[in-house]
Image: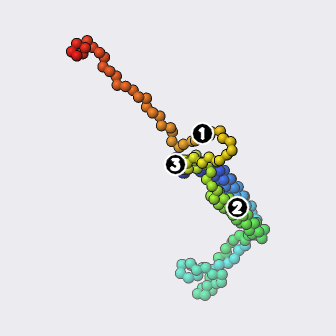
Amino acid sequence: MRASSRPAPCTRRLWRKRHALLALLALLAASLCSLSAAQTQRQSTTLWRCGPEGRELRDAPCPEALHQPGQRLDYDQPLAAQRSEARRTAERDARLARQLEKERRELETRPPGSVAAIHGRAGPAAPAPAASKPAAQPVFSSKPPKTQKPRTTKPRPPATNAAAASG
């Protein structure tokens, strides 16, 4: 996984908060939908199908066929309480969206701080001038330290009597 695709810890908290709010909104919307189905007023009207193949709908009889009976169409009309509840829900959602956008913008404008050093995007911070010497803090790097290989000497051939005699 690339380091840039992983969100910072403070961003994770914000995402968890957003997901929790979205889940709550979805649950609320589902419950309102189930309640609204039972609270609507049933109404009906009469429609006439005119034109070729009956593709034109009218609320008055067709001029070419005045004797043709109309078709009854039933529909649900929302109550005033439902309309006001939907308006309140939309306003609450808009307020929440503005709040989340404000939090996101604040998070984006915040200086990177120490989180960037964790991912290796920024170098070590410059030490602040102080009157007394602070304790030495370890500097973390994104790369492991290099280890040097131990130096070995070439093995010498064993001294034999034949090599000593010829030489």
For mark 2, what is the residue? 99
**Quarter of the figure with residue 150:** top left
Q: What's under tag 3, amino acid-wise?
A: Arg
- Left or right of 159: which side holds 166? left
43 w.r.t. 20: above or below: below
Q: Where is residue 124 shown, x and y percent of the image?
A: 57, 46
Q: Which is nearer the eye, 33 or 152?
A: 152
For mark 3, what is the residue? 2
Q: Residue at x 61, y 87 (%)?
A: 63
**Quarter of the figure with residue 23:** bottom right
Label 2 crowding class (10 Å Cα cut-off): few <14, some 14-19, many 20+?
few
Which residue lies most toward the left here?
Answer: 166
Task: Residue 12: tell me if it is visible.
Answer: no
For mark 1, what is the residue? 138
* Real-space Cα separation, disc 1 to disc 2, in angstroms: 39 Å
Q: Where is residue 10 shown, x and y percent of the image?
A: 65, 50
Q: Which is nearer the eye, 98 or 34?
A: 98
Q: Earlier in the sequence, mark 1 or mark 3?
A: 3
Q: Earlier in the sequence, mark 1 or mark 2?
A: 2
Label 3 crowding class (10 Å Cα cut-off): few <14, some 14-19, many 20+?
few
Q: Quadrant of the C terminus?
A: top left
Q: What's under tag 1, amino acid-wise?
A: Pro
Which residue lies most toward the right here?
Answer: 81
Q: Which is nearer the eye, 77 or 145?
A: 145
Label 1–label 3 contact, CB within 8 A: no
Q: Residue at x 59, y 48 (%)?
A: 125
* Real-space Cα separation, disc 1 to disc 3, in angstroms: 25 Å
Q: What's under tag 2, amino acid-wise?
A: Gln
Label 1–label 2 contact, CB within 8 A: no
